[in-house]
Amino acid sequence: MEPDELTSEERAQQAEVDAAHPWMLVERRLIRQFAERRGGVTLEYLRLAEGPHFGRRPVLSDEECAKRLNVPVSTLRSIRLELARETFPELVASPEFKDEARRKRLPEPGTAEYWEVVKKKRRRGAKYGPAET
């Protein structure tokens, strides 16, 4: 086992989370596909920043990734923005995401009410995706 690979216990914990939140499997697949399609710095950055999506240990900050990859943080933030633009529409359209949103009584993605919830969560430091309101 490589030092940054997930242990069997960590894989089991991840499987429990995935079983409880199937939309996360969709997100993981979309992130991996995006990274593999782009390759290069994008792939290396997302492997470092989104480790569990690649079966690796988490998670370095953008600043730590920039130092390791010898690129400006702004480059990584651009990659993150492109990732969100490309994958978020497919994620929120997925049945898994919609099921989670219904269970948590979130507004329909894309509506004004939905974006108000997202703004409030971002102000509190939450990542995008279904979250309790």
Image (spheres, rainbow, N blue to C red):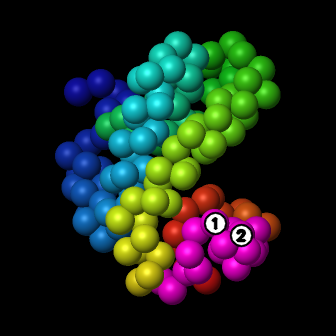
Labels 1 & 2 near each other (Cβ < 8 A): yes
In this orientation, does residue 57 appear? Answer: no
Q: Earlier in the sequence, mark 1 or mark 2?
A: 1
Look at 47% across and 54% down and name the residue there: 91
Q: Within the image, what quadrant is residue 86 found in?
A: top right
- As helix, strand or loop, the secondary structure at mark 2 comes to helix
Q: Residue 1 or 39: which is nearer the viewer?
A: 39
Residue type, label 1? Gly
Q: Is residue 119 left or right of residue 62?
A: right
- Does residue 25 appear in this view? yes
Relative to 6, say whether 94 is above or below: below
Which residue position holds label 1? 110
Q: Secondary structure at mark 1?
A: loop
Whole-percent x and y of residue 70?
Answer: 69, 13
Q: Position of residue 114 (x, y in %)?
A: 66, 74
The x, y position of residue 33, in whole percent, is 40, 32
Mark 1 Cα within 10 Å, few/some/many (few <14, many 20+)?
few
Q: Which label sits in the foreground, 1 or 2?
A: 1
**Residue 4 x %, y %:** 38, 30
Foreground of the two, 4 or 71: 71
Quadrant in the picture for residue 112: bottom right
Q: Quadrant of the N terminus?
A: top left
For the residue pair 123 and 105, the one nearer the viewer reads as: 105
Left/right of residue 89 with respect to residue 27 in the rendered view: right
Residue drawn 72% across the image and 31% down it: 78
Instruction: Using the numbered discs, state the Cα–Cα distance from disc 1 to disc 2 in whole angstroms.
Output: 7 Å
Indicate which disc residue 62 carries: none
Report the span colored magenta: 104-120
Q: Is residue 119 magenta?
A: yes
What residue is rendered at 64% in x and 35% in y? Answer: 82
Q: Is residue 91 shown above or below 38?
A: below
Residue under label 2, please give it.
115
